[in-house]
Image: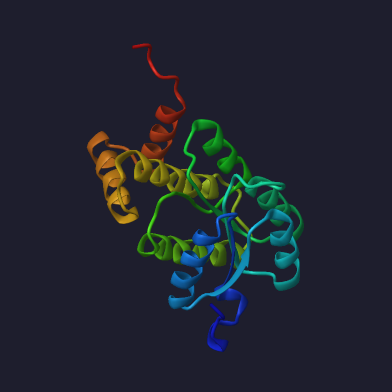
Amino acid sequence: MNPSPASASKGRRILVVDDDRLVLATLGRGLASAGFEVLFADNGDDAILLAREHRPGLALLDIRMDGLSGFDVAAYLREHLHIPFMFLSAFADAATIARVAELGALAYLIKPLDISQIVPAVETAFARARELGAAPAPASAHPALEQEVALALGALMQRERLPRAAALARLEGLAAAAGLTLAQQAARELAALEAPSPAA
């Protein structure tokens, strides 16, 4: 799974962190085939060391690992290295999603996903990271709105077992039907997810 020299620029370099070696192998093959230079770590300490040495353009982080969690790694990447990140996790509870939002992840993908779904999400995250790095963020809530849409997409993908494109179409359809913007519908979806379930 060695990257090709043509893909060796920071703009296509991604750090993949997961304590499941099968997940690492699967993601590595798929992302390398899509033209990414892939760095691997199966724990948070190694992830931080690799990030400091190689400065990837993006990190794809599992959340629950022994030792440092994906949240710990994300906080370090944000505060010390200014490296954008996204999460890939089997957990979609309200507390996890709230923490993902607080950290400022570019995307939140729910396992299990096949590589055909992950590659477009990674491409989108890289594009978003380039946008954020090209100019100072405006003094508005726009980045947070983008983030809410990404989180709502992840929730829809999990709840309705949809691929990313279908989840986006579903979210857009719900927004149109309710006369809302995409960001407003995303906020509604997240609020519903965080609301306590009614007693049976």
Residue 84, by quadrant, is bottom right
Residue 155, by quadrant, is top left
Residue 43 position (above or below residue 6): above
Which is nearer the eye, 66 or 14?
Answer: 66
Residue 66 position (above or below residue 39): above
Q: Which residue is drawn at the image coordinates 54% and 85% (left, top)?
A: 4
Residue 141: image location, x then y, percent: 55, 44
Q: Is residue 49 left or right of residue 148?
A: right
Q: What quarter of the picture does the C terminus occupy? A: top left
Q: Is residue 115 left or right of residue 75?
A: left
Is the image coloured rainbow, by chain, by secondary structure, or in one colour? rainbow
Q: Is residue 47 left or right of residue 8?
A: right
Residue 15, by quadrant, is bottom right
Q: Which residue is drawn at the image coordinates 69% and 52% (left, top)?
A: 73
Residue 138: image location, x then y, percent: 59, 53
Residue 33 position (above or below residue 110): below
Residue 95: image location, x then y, percent: 55, 32
Name the outermost residue toward the top.
199
Q: Is residue 150 left or right of residue 69?
A: left
Which is nearer the eye, 80 or 113?
Answer: 113
Residue 197 position (above or below residue 142): above
Report the label total. 0
